[in-house]
Image: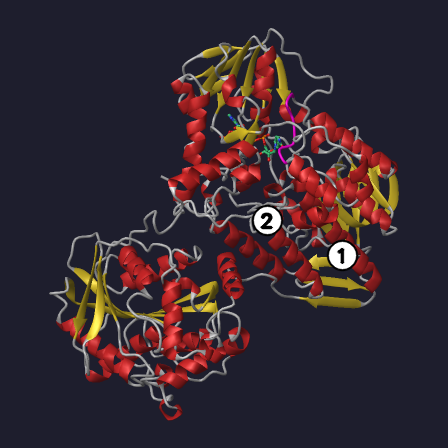
Amino acid sequence: MNQTATVSEQFDAVIVGAGFSGLYMLHRLRQLGLSVKVFDAAGDVGGTWYWNRYPGARCDIPTTDYAYSFDPELEKEWTWSEKYATQPEILDYLRFVADRHRLRSDIEFSTTVTSARWDEQAKRWRIATDRGKEVWCRYYIMASGCLSIPKSADIEGAGRFTGQVYFTSQWPHEGADFTGQRVAIIGTGSSGIQCIPLIARQASQLTVFQRTPNFSIPARNGPAPADRLMQLSEDRAAYRHAARWSRGGIPVEPTDVLGVTASEAVRRERFEAAWEQGELFAILGVFADQGVNPASNDIVAEMIRERIRSAVEDAATAEALCPKDHYFGTKRPCLDTGYFETYNLPHVRLVDLRTQPITSISEQGIDTADESFGFDAIVYATGFDAMTGALAAVDVAGRGGLSLAEKWAPGPSTYLGLMTAGFPNLFMITGPGSPSVLSNMTVSIEQHVDWVAGCVKDMREAGFETIEPTALAESAWGEHVRDCAAITLHPTASSWYMGANVPGKPRVFLPYIGGVNAYRQACDDVVSQGYLGFRRTGRGRDQCRDGVIRSMQPDVAMVLEVMAGLGLPPMETLSAADARALMAATTATRPPAPEVGEVTDGVMPGPEEDLPYRLYRPAAPAGPHPIVVYFHGGGWVLGDLDSDDPLCRDLCARTGAVVVSVNYRHAPEARFPAAAQDAFKAVQWVDANAVSLGGIPGQLAVAGWSAGGNIAAVACQMARDAGGPRIAGQLLICPVVDSEMTRPSYAENGDGYILTTALMRWFWDHYADPADRGDPRAAPLRGSPDDLPPACIVTAECDPLRDEGVAYARALEAAGATVRHIRARGHTHTSVTMVGVIISGAPVRAQIAQALADFFPAPIAAPVTGALSHSSIG
Ligand code: NAP
């Protein structure tokens, strides 16, 4: 209880913050007829643009796009003077908006919200401020910004300095005059890079203390871009609509050019164009794969480094300014005006803190390991406690007194970045888990505000008093946010996106990187599915639509979308020959597969005819090696040595085992049990010839995917029944183990995920007569599970075959076999095996490789190299 509370007022909604978010939220809630109070610690509207008044402060999204779109008249009445407007102009704009919509009357300035407590009885929030005021509200909306709590000066001795101290994030309103002064600037993020050239114009000496060099490109500021202005004047609504449904909140035509496969000429041409354009989304989109592929990323990064080296005259300074410890784009890149050239001025010096760390700040200046510097002023451009800082700055207690700070101690957890379980009716505008800082903020802000306003409207109309996400929906969204980040290079950087700039802050990737468009669709889908993932209560009603809005791995979803767009005929409508031709055509377009030591083709005797095989030998360690006999997928009808070549290479490279991929006879030419007989014969032959194949006798495992998993499992049963050969382990990836097609996974995943129920039926019809489908050599789940080798069984969440794989794992386990069951979350029947295409399959294949390696007695190397994973940077 706030003892100093003197006044208690009731509002429908309280909003914290009067920047872009808070102003528009106020406007929307007023339109709904709600009583609203806005609090802001600042003396006027503006949010981030009120505080960050340092010289050179500008937006770095073109102002044509960095503006509200909700009010077409406003757009007509306001004209931006530059491509990237200055802070004073943006502040003027926000004042203009506040005046135009008469917003100030509901805003209390110079007032900080200190605590917010949910009252379960009243179903309201009790809000306390630093002015001793207490107000109650139904809806509590944090529109407090992503970058609004400055990091403190976390450097030893910071309080001792007797000269002038400035923070870019809290710049004095009267400005600062550095004429004739010796000035230090600490920090080379966007703020530092913007103010350094301007402070250099005044200071007699400027020393920049750089911990991490940053990628920056010339902003090429000037008049607002003519092409954008034309598009806006021709069809403003269409332009804004395109922005809302774009990836980053600006209409940009995405490229499909891959850096790794583009010619040098194309690479240069695309880079030059982006460099000349001077826009962040252009340089971030030179290649489609630069955010996920280290090699592609390095092409762009190196071209930027070339520019830095040519701009800075002193070679050592240039090299120190070249970022090399993070992939381009994984820390927020900057736009600048003459930043690198500033270091050519005789009175400007760079101190590289990597080689010369600050030991402490003294009364007179800054001491490093090598030198003592005297200064008249120190400017901290050291950044913010991003994304969670402002939310955690208020003492928030939700249901049952749950503290937000405590709940989020391991990292923030939200549903859609909009709400968090345990805190009913608390909305966040651009909270963690939403695109926010990775997007054009104004577009993301409007989308959040519109969503919240729609939600409040829907609640009032339906008579609900509270809304809160379910624990399941929230944790699944968190997984989705992590899945999206995991396929990119972003988590490899020590960035503020990761919380890495604040000592002790948990390292989690805070924003949603799946794109503004994908995110908007998810939010819309939640609503159209009756507020999926939310519980709403009121007037004796309790409506909970528990569920998960996105569970598929993002790259899998993307591939499915692309494939759907190709309009290919369903396989099951084709003849076997045409289906094989289609598969071969798809195979030819795959990216290069991992390198292995040696690949040789040969033939081995089969039960009726010779069987072609392909042998993959690892580059290391030196042989002999354990051997894995591998059977490809394709429903006993399709597939060959080429179809599963990338997977075989991947298994070989990851495990250090020899992989022998066998091309068994196919249906309908050779129906059941031909494939199973071939598989068993191949295992016998490889076992007998292990030494000449470079294998270790007795160290033999079998593996297979899909129908290949079927015959691998069958070969194990046949080997057991025949008394040999001894098989060290069976790796069954999404195997067909039963002919029964009624398990729930068929109902859930039987359509839309490439392997469909109809296609599976087509496979069975080609392979086996109905009377044979219960034979354990066709349906190994029907066979005895006793005395089988250890197994690794991989099942994919979105696979019709999932439940039979689960059943086989259980049956083997119940019979006493050692079973490792890998559940590939968010994957389809095919996606785990799509080496080089589905990035999210790589960690699953790393687990598979480990399981395969574990079948063999002596530890074998399971090298996960850069070519197989991008989880490390050299
Ligand atoms: P920032 O990007 O976090 O940069 C802070 C800088 O200070 C980094 O170089 C950091 O080094 C350094 N630093 C922090 N603590 C330090 C310490 N104890 N000792 C030495 N160096 C230290 O912060 P920012 O420049 O204020 O920008 C934050 C974000 O605000 C930007 O990324 C951008 O999203 C937004 N912003 C936008 C604009 C615009 O629209 N034009 C302008 C300014 C800011 P490390 O990298 O090693 O941590």
Task: Find ligand 1 in the image and state its quadrant.
Answer: top right
Quadrant housing residue 580: bottom left
Residue at image mark 2: 247
Which x, y percent locates residue 487? 47, 51
Indicate yes or no whether the magenta region holds residue 125.
no
Residue type, label 2: Arg
Q: Determine if the C-beta at disc 2 is less than 8 A from ligand 1.
A: no
Most extreme residue toward the top, as rendered? 180
Please tell me which residue lies in front, 97 or 713: 97
Give the magenta part as a residue range: 55-61
Q: How many marks?
A: 2
Is residue 632 or residue 242 the one in the foreground?
A: 242
Q: In the rendered image, which quarter contains the C terminus?
A: top left
Residue 798 visible within the image:
yes
Task: Give the labeled residue for mark 1.
Answer: 455
Element type at marker 2? loop
Distance CA(mark 1)–CA(mark 2):
24 Å
